[in-house]
Amino acid sequence: MKHVELFSGIGGFRQALNLIQKDFDISFECVAFSEIEKNAITTYKANYDTADEIEMGDIVSFNSDEENIRNLHFDLLTGGFPCQPFSMMGEQKGFADTRGTMFFEIEKILRVKKEQGEQIPFVILENVKNLYTHDKGNTFSTIKKHLENLGYSFFSSIFNTENFALAQKRNRIIMFATTKDLPDDFEFSAEKIKQVFDAHIEEFQSIYKQKTTLDVLDKEVSEKYFLSERLKPTILSNGTAGFKSNSKINLLTARPLCATMHKMHRACQDNYFSQEFITSNDPFLYLQHEYTKEEEATHLIRKLTPEEAFNLQGFPKDFCKKSRELKISDSALYKQAGNAVSVNVIYAIIYYLFVNQKLGV
């Protein structure tokens, strides 16, 4: 099955497809990918062999010449199109934001291929949970309507990463569209796919299977990842009179990773861990610990490393290695991890669709 990965980032969809191929001998070939962020492209090309693939670059520029689209031949289109216009953390401008119009570039590719007589049978898209409710549901309804108007059956559900053997809580909407005939009882839901995933998890040899953050955290890391005495009071505080929060560290399930992890937010937003929790023979003594002012001064507390952040998204820790060799900074790697699609979620969906339900057969 030939695959085009749009808004690829570091290749979360591609990584999942590669692992499915390894575990179940199903052929997936990436023929083209698009990305505009140069550091993400560096990491992508450092970890995947893209020598014979079309590097689409800026999708708007690529699509401006429809002959570029007609020269693409593929069966599966995937993409985590920009989420900032719909995110609770942003201004929620939606389609009024240039990045929010990227869905229509996806639609253009699908329309041109249909007009060419090569309608793409499978589409899988990812975005933030808030897409469902943005603009009182109108944004989501528009996406659904446009895909249905192109002849697709459309499905969607909200998937939580922690339900698919990764130690991170992260809710994302996954949309699946297909032109294939489906069984009358076909169901595309996070609950159904988790049920299938859990039933077959012993067959999944290539994915990471984490029960807690302790499966990810390295016992020894560089000193630069530890909080300074100056930063500790701010990072661990519960806020001020105008902003109160419940800052806890040492969580067994990590908070959602964000693209701005390198900025080091308070411990109510980002993930921080004490060295006692990581190295203790009884780490449960330190669960969700709230340190007193006196304790802050005597305990070593650190943030995630980029390698650990990648791992919490389902990538191997050495995914960063080649990027580091190419002088990609920690801040860029944190951004890449925060923007990535969680590999295990996509793996579970691909398994359900193409192994369990045999839709590609």
Image: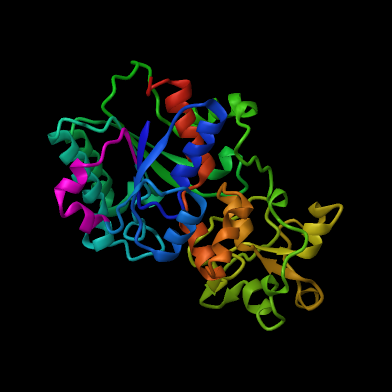
Say whether residue 158 is visible. Answer: yes
* Quadrant that contains the N terminus: top left
* Quadrant that contains the C terminus: top left
332 vs 120, left or right, is right
Spot occupied by residue 338 in the image (x, y as percentages of width and height): 50, 58
Q: Which residues are magenta?
A: 59-77
Q: Quadrant of residue 178?
A: top left
361 vs 208, left or right, is left
Residue closer to the observer: 75 or 186: 75
Say whether residue 160 is visible. Answer: no
175 vs 271, left or right, is left
> Does the magenta run of residues contain 68?
yes
Spot occupied by residue 96 in the image (x, y as percentages of width and height): 21, 61
Spot occupied by residue 252 in the image (x, y as percentages of width and height): 68, 51
Q: Residue at x 43, y 31 (%)?
A: 189
Q: Residue at x 42, y 27 (%)?
A: 353
Q: Is residue 186 above or below residue 235?
A: above
For the view shown, which residue lies furthest in the bottom direction?
Answer: 230
